[in-house]
Structure formats: C-alpha cells, structure tokens
Amino acid sequence: MDLVKLNMYQRLRDFEVPSSILDEIFADEGDLEVLESNWKELENNGMSADEIAAEIAKMIFEQLDISPDQFTEENE
C-alpha cells in the first residue's frame, strides 16, 4: 500500500471507521478508485485531510446505516 493510501486509511481510522470496513473498501479496486478520486477532488476544493476524512467517515456510516459506537470494542 502506498503512502497516500496508507494516509487515507489511517485518517479514516482516526474518525472511527472500523478496520473491517476499510479493509473491504481498500481490497476492492472499484471502491478504492472512488475513494481516491473523491478524496483528491475534495483536496482540490481546499479541504484539509482531517476535514475530508470526517466527511467521508460520516458518509460511510450513513450509507451502511451504522454508528461509530457500534464498533467500540474494536477501537479499544
């Protein structure tokens, strides 16, 4: 995994996206391509990496209809 992808992964983990969900996203080339292109677009619009991670994490939780606290054991 290159540094850009590793940075995206870690930033999303910082916003409590479970590693099991991120592993699925990063293992699927189509999902990863969508993530990377949207991340770059948001960067080009002036958002910081933390702002981008927060927004993408929020969207992941909404799309999967889950909340971060459902995975507290993993984060401990």
Image (cartoon, rainbow, N blue to C red):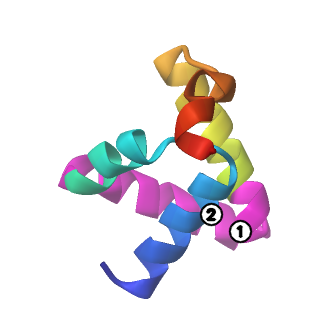
Residue beneath disc 1: 49
The residue under label 1 is which amino acid type?
Ala
Name the quadrant containing residue 46.
Answer: bottom right
x and y percentages locating residue 76 in the rendered image: 63, 44
Please indicate, yes or no, whether residue 17 appears anywhere in the rendered image. no
Please indicate, yes or no, whether residue 7 appears anywhere in the rendered image. yes
Q: Secondary structure at mark 2?
A: helix
Q: Is residue 6 left or right of residue 69?
A: left
Residue beneath disc 2: 11
- Front-most of 43 and 31? 31
Q: Residues within 10 Å of mark 1 (few under 14, many from 20)?
A: some
- Front-most of 51 and 6? 6
x and y percentages locating residue 5 in the rendered image: 42, 73
Q: Residue at x 56, y 18 (%)?
A: 66
Q: Hey, which residue is sitting farthest top in the picture?
A: 65
Instruction: Check the image and report above or below for 7 versus 56.
Output: below
Q: Which residues are magenta?
A: 28-52
Magenta-span inclusion, residue 21: no
Q: Which circle's residue, 1 or 2, is located before the other in the chain?
A: 2
Name the quadrant containing residue 55.
Answer: top right
The residue under label 2 is which amino acid type?
Arg
